[in-house]
Image: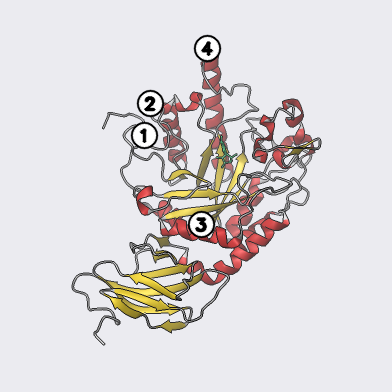
Amino acid sequence: TIALQHGAHRIGVRTDADMARWRSLRFGQFIHWGVYAIPGGEWKGKTYNGAAEWIRSWKELPHEEYDNLYRQFNPVNFDAQQWASQAKEMGAKYMIITTKHHDGFCLWPSKYSKYTIAASPYKKDLLGPMVAAYNKAGIDVYLYFSIIDWSHPDYRASLKTAADSAANKRFQVFVKNQLAELLQRYPTVKGFWFDGTWDDSWKRDGAFTDELEQYLQSIHPGLVMGSRLRADEKGARHFDSNGRLMGDYEQGWERKLPEKIEDVHGNDWEAVMTVPENQWGYNAQWAGHIKTANELLEMLVKSVSLNGNFVLNFGPKADGTFRTEEQQLMTQIGQWMKINGEAVYNGTYAGFEKQDWGYYIRKAGTDSVYMVVFNIPVSGSLRVKMPAHTSLVSVSLQQQTLTPELIGRNEYFIHLSGKQSDTPVVILLKTTSGENKEKGNFEKAK
Ligand SMILES: COc1ccc([C@H]2[C@H](O)[C@H](O)[C@H](C)N2C)cc1
């Protein structure tokens, strides 16, 4: 390894209570909301093919016009209580809200910028009511914050001149001030979700990113911040130049999931996912494949089975309401979570050999292992190979006790006689482990 001043400061996962809480939540709701919801991916009859929240970068929409959209931003139908209750119904345990995206428009009346909700017809702070309503519903709130800020005169993507460096210094002060302001205004938030940290100007100043992270922890101990904030002094991001994860969890899983446990290298991690292929902010016409509730449940369950969190994104309209498709998804996912959430919350990697029928999830610190079945085989028989020194004590499907068939050494078939289901099936295995523990109930010779 090489000597680093601003690389990872910790080997292995965070073991404090705040991180344990983040880890227990497993299922989050991302919300991308801002003035980009006004065009919604379209402008003067033309459709923008990129992600709707990036429409300002589209040559068909002059910056001057985009930067005046805030004059129309008036979410009269915004109802924080309604947002929080539908998130609760879906089963989300945390929410991540865009305080400001790359365009720099602030959903809160920041005293460090004129480009805020205070300048809009709506005038009022949007974040305060959101944080209060979600917390009241028992949902933790995390703040998305884009370092890139296209609206700020001192923002520089790269530093070519001394003037650039001077501007960048001023910009760093601005960033630090806004982050401190957010923590001061919304003290119950549990962390930041940083974005827009790929430009040279940011990743070349590893020392600043390190000091900033430590500063934020000092004024708000316990904050949970992922690997997107920092760079080490060599410009390495997420993983420092010694391959060690920076930040509290790996934050690179954007619209993609790891395949197997080795892919996450023993780190905490979180995946963020869009319902369409790549739309975060509101996009009027959803084109391409729109993920179904079952697809999204499989991503959630797969993430938890690999020791990670899964965050599903929603893009409210400019008026503050959610599109019908998103409301229907929240309801459908919530119907499954209401019955089966126990398999997701506090879920961890089970240590069982993966089978084709679906995923194993271990309830943290227990001998309870859930099988979440997405693919019932034509045989109806679910193969279960017990890990070494682990015995099977009982098998149940909801309130029904099942008797597995012993088909080999510590290997079973669980027969789902003629079972069909249009949503994932959850089976609970009670196990016992340890060298000299008594054998499970199904190993005695017939
Ligand atoms: C250049 O590729 C990008 C850059 C930024 C993103 C942003 C999206 O706008 C959204 O906020 C997502 C979480 N973030 C990574 C996505 C892809």
Label 2, label 4: how far apart the Cα atoms are = 20 Å
| Left or right relative to 17: residue 255 | right
Q: Which quadrant does the N terminus fall into? A: top left
Q: Are marks 2 and 1 in contact (CB under 8 Å)?
A: yes
> Where does the image place residue 361, in percent across and percent down from the top left?
41, 64
Front one among 202 and 282:
282
Query: Dot 1 corresponds to which residue?
Result: 240
Residue at the image point whose x is 44% and y is 36% from the top: 213
Q: Position of residue 293 (x, y in %)?
A: 60, 61
Left or right of 175: which side holds 268?
left
Say whether disc 2 or disc 1 marks the residue closer to the N-terminus: 2
Residue of label 3: 299
Residue closer to the observer: 412 or 258: 412
Q: Return the disc, 4 or 3, that comes first in the chain's sequence.
A: 4
Residue 380 image point, x, y percent? 46, 76
State which image quarter holds ligand 1.
top right
Q: At 31% across and 34% down in the image, what residue appears? A: 242
Residue at label 4? 161
**Which residue occupies 52% across, 31% down?**
176
